[in-house]
Image (cartoon, coloured by chain):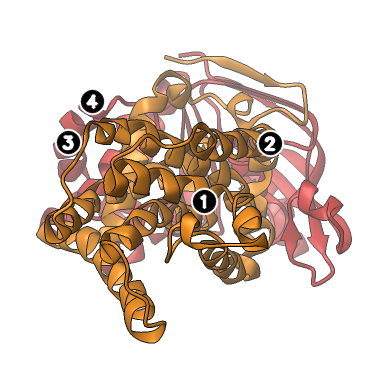
Amino acid sequence: MNAAIHARGIGIRFLFDRDRRPVTPMRARLGFGGGEAWGFHDLSFSIGPGEGVALIGPSGSGKTTLLRALAGVVSPDAGTLTVQGRIASLLSVEAGVMAVLTGRENAHLLGVLAGLSRAEADARVEDIRERSKLGEHFERPVLSYSQGMRARLGFSVAEEIKPDILLLDEVHEALDHEFRNFVQQRAEEILAAGGIVIAAGHDHPMLERLCGRALHLERGTLRADGPFTEIQQAYLAQV
Amino acid sequence: MSETVDLEDPGATPAAASGVPAQRERPLDVLIALTRSDLRARYGRGASQLVKWVLEPVALVGVYLLLRVVIFDRGGHAVGLSIACSIVPFQIVLLSTGSAMNCVSFREPILLNMRFNRMLLPLSSLLTETLAFGASFGLLALMMILYGVAPTWWILLLPVVVAATVALAIGIAYPAALVGVWFPDARLFAIQFLRILYFAAPGLVALSEIHGRAHELFKLNPLTGLFEAYRDIILFGRAPSFWMLLYPVGVGLVLLLIFVPIYRREQNHFAKVIGA
């Protein structure tokens, strides 16, 4: 496993209509344009094999947008982003699962979307059920799940694709202690195998266990990049 | 199983943005998985699925049959079958358009979490409704039995007519998906516009019963050819005119040529809009 991420001057731009609702570029060109703002801009960094990196910063600093760019959910509007490795991501409180589907149906769908064939996804559903420890809830619609149960399901599916790069955005904070330990153990295994773990959130003790390095984001810019403890102390000193 | 990808071009597709290679290798699996989940979300699970599929077109035919026979006091030859010949193809166009308009927002939790082939979203909406469309063929068979209309060899052209219907529906699905993202408040209006198109076509009566300027104007509506083609092969037992199939297929192709490239560019930004 030789996971790597290189970002050179990347930025994500949001366009708005007159009511300040975000719109796509073509929609903005159709008229009623209301300006633009950068989620983050001019970010440059490299992350190599075996690195755990925390994204630290206040709400609105660009952490989630950066994670979405790294996951390929949005494409940078500026700069160059190179990602090497198979990615698994948990980037929303919904943990990427569909509320109207059951745990089993989500496991199949997300497995296929993540790269498994339908037959492979079917074959691995029982493993996902086992790992998620959802029991009989696995056969019920996800809308009956708690946030923590959704995160368990999402993480269990993400695990199934054997990621080289794991992206976590606060979702792990919804997990109970038992599953947190499991996530931490898996993150350590990914790092030990030369993978990358990038996590954002406000639970700094949890981040510290996963990450030796931190990027401090503020208003969409990279304020500092260095060892976790050093960056965290500088961040906490200013808030 | 890793790969290296670069994003040198800011306008590149999301497929270039990160390293999960799956959907480029297995678009058919992704399409089927999306459609299966769509079917469960839209029609539920188990036996109730089939009941809902069949009842929807039956209910629609009943409404229009009532409108024509009772309200307008107009009878005619196998009027229920004639209306069913327009309702069934209209169903797929209407329902796939409605489904396509919601296909991006409906997938919000997944769209915000992982990269996958978003070009397939309108297609999965279409496939979902096409399967529903398949179930409603029972209605046509039932009407033929009720009215004592025997099938002729021309009914073998049904797959061709269905293909023309799907071609038009697929052409509409991509702009519909964009409308759903660009103007979410206009979704209802768009559906009402399509309903108007049904009445601006020979939906309740055959084109031969419409005279004057309306007769010529209705031919501009791509639904007209489809409705007439279904009637020809099912009700009248004759060959459909060439234009009846060619025109809706042509409209579908033109829409695809215009809107697929736009959709391809815009999909890079869907998460910015729905995730806000």
CA distance separating discs 4 and 3: 11 Å
Q: Which residue is mark 1?
A: B223
- Which residue is found at the position 57% from the left and 50% from the top? B177
What is the CA distance from the residue labelled 1 to the residue labelled 3? 49 Å
The three-letter amino acid code for the residue at tag 1 is Leu
Q: Residues within 10 Å of mark 2 (few under 14, many from 20)?
A: many
Tag 2 near tag 3, CB within 8 Å: no
The disc at residue A75 is 2
- Which residue in the structure is indicated by mark 4? A120
Instruction: Give the color of chain B as drawn.
Output: orange
Place residue B243 in its image quadrant: top right
Q: Colour of chain A?
A: red
| Quadrant in the picture for residue A193 | top left
| Residues beneath discs 4 and 2 located on the same chain | yes
Q: Could you tell me how many numbered marks the image carries?
A: 4
| Mark 3 crowdedness (10 Å alpha carbons): few <14, some 14-19, many ≥20 | some
Position of B94 with respect to A175 (left or right) is right
